[in-house]
Image (cartoon, helix red, strand yellow):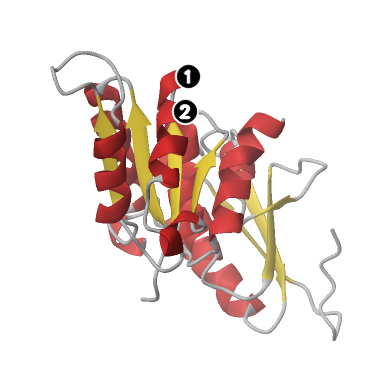
């Protein structure tokens, strides 16, 4: 998948996963739901994994199996890419609060 | 919020159906309508066409309804229930080829974002494609 937006701008961010159980089912659902609110193409990966995965695919996000304290990298391109990266970083940093979804 | 695809869970066991619906509500939230049915009218294991029809109509949405089933009869009875719906609804209901619990959570997650019935089904079935 290519992430280049028309103007070539890719927004990136990274955040430490503080959730006690790592990226398990419930956080994955929250992350996916939030990602879907944005038009931007959004990809994430954990701890420098080779592959970026689509942040809007709940099956793929759950399959990340990122452990606690891993660094989640986020990149996005498209009109609202900046807002998308900021919102996702906040969600992970705040440990997936219930009111976020 | 725009309409979202409704989710119906059909298990041979009422406890499994209810537990799956609870997981969907707690993990995904209340913006997606979820109905469940399981067991036969005598309280034993089984699935029942009228109950499935009732569940479909309960969560009806113009975007359609995705059904998640467990074993054999749950699928055939769900297909029969779809056949017996009023004609304009039949085409907007699909039985997903996916594991019941995982499929329900993933389908509901996709539905919550306002996705179409086809997208919701594809996400649920992604699990069995691997």
Please, is residue B18 above or below residue A3 in the view? above
Residue B3 sits in quarter = bottom left
Q: Are marks 2 and 1 in contact (CB under 8 Å)?
A: yes
Residue drawn at (43%, 42%) of the image: B67
Between circles 2 and 1, the one closer to the viewer is 2
Q: Residue at point 57% right, 34% down?
A: B97
Question: What is the count of numbered marks?
Answer: 2
Do marks 2 and 1 both belong to one polypeptide chain?
yes
Quadrant showing the N terminus of chain B: bottom left
Pointer 1 residue:
B72
Between residues A59 and B52, which one lies in front from this camera angle? B52
Q: Position of residue B64 (x, y in %)?
A: 45, 60
Which residue ends up furthest to the left in the rendered image? Answer: B42
Q: Position of residue A27 (x, y in %)?
A: 44, 46
Residue A3: percent from left, percent from top: 81, 67
Give the secondary structure at mark 2. helix
- In this picture, residue A78 sits left or right of residue B9: right
Q: Is residue A10 above or below residue A47?
A: below
Label 2 resides on the chain identified as: B
Task: Indicate the chain on which mark 1 is placed.
Answer: B
Comparing A32 with B37, the one in front is B37
* Quadrant hosting residue A77: bottom right
Q: Which mark is residue A70?
A: none
Q: What residue would you read off at disc 2?
A: B76
Kind of element beneath mark 1: helix
Q: Residues within 10 Å of mark 1 (few under 14, many from 20)?
A: few
Q: Residue at x 55, y 33 (%)?
A: B98
Q: Is residue B103 visible?
A: yes
């Amino acid at each position: 998948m290519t992430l280049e937006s028309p103007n070539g701008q890719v927004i990136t961010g990274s955040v430490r996963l503080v959730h006690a159980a790592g990226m398990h089912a419930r956080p994955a659902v929250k992350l996916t739901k939030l990602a879907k609110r944005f038009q931007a193409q959004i990809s994430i990966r954990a701890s420098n994994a080779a592959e970026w995965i689509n942040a809007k695919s709940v099956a793929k996000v759950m399959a990340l199996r990122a452990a606690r304290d891993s660094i989640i990298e986020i990149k996005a391109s498209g009109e609202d890419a900046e807002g998308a990266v900021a919102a996702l970083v906040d969600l992970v940093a705040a440990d997936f609060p219930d009111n976020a979804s | 919020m725009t309409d979202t695809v409704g989710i119906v869970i059909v298990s041979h066991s009422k406890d499994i159906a209810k537990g799956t619906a609870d997981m969907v509500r707690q993990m995904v939230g209340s913006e997606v309508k979820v109905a469940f049915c399981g067991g036969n009218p005598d309280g034993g294991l089984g699935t029942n066409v009228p109950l499935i029809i009732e569940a479909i109509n309960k969560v009806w949405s113009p975007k359609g309804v995705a059904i998640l089933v467990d074993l054999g009869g749950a699928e055939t009875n769900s297909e029969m229930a779809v056949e017996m719906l009023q004609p304009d609804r039949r085409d907007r209901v699909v039985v997903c080829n996916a594991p019941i619990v995982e499929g329900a959570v993933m389908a509901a997650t996709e539905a919550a974002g306002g996705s179409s019935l086809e997208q919701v089904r594809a996400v649920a079935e992604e699990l069995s494609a691997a």
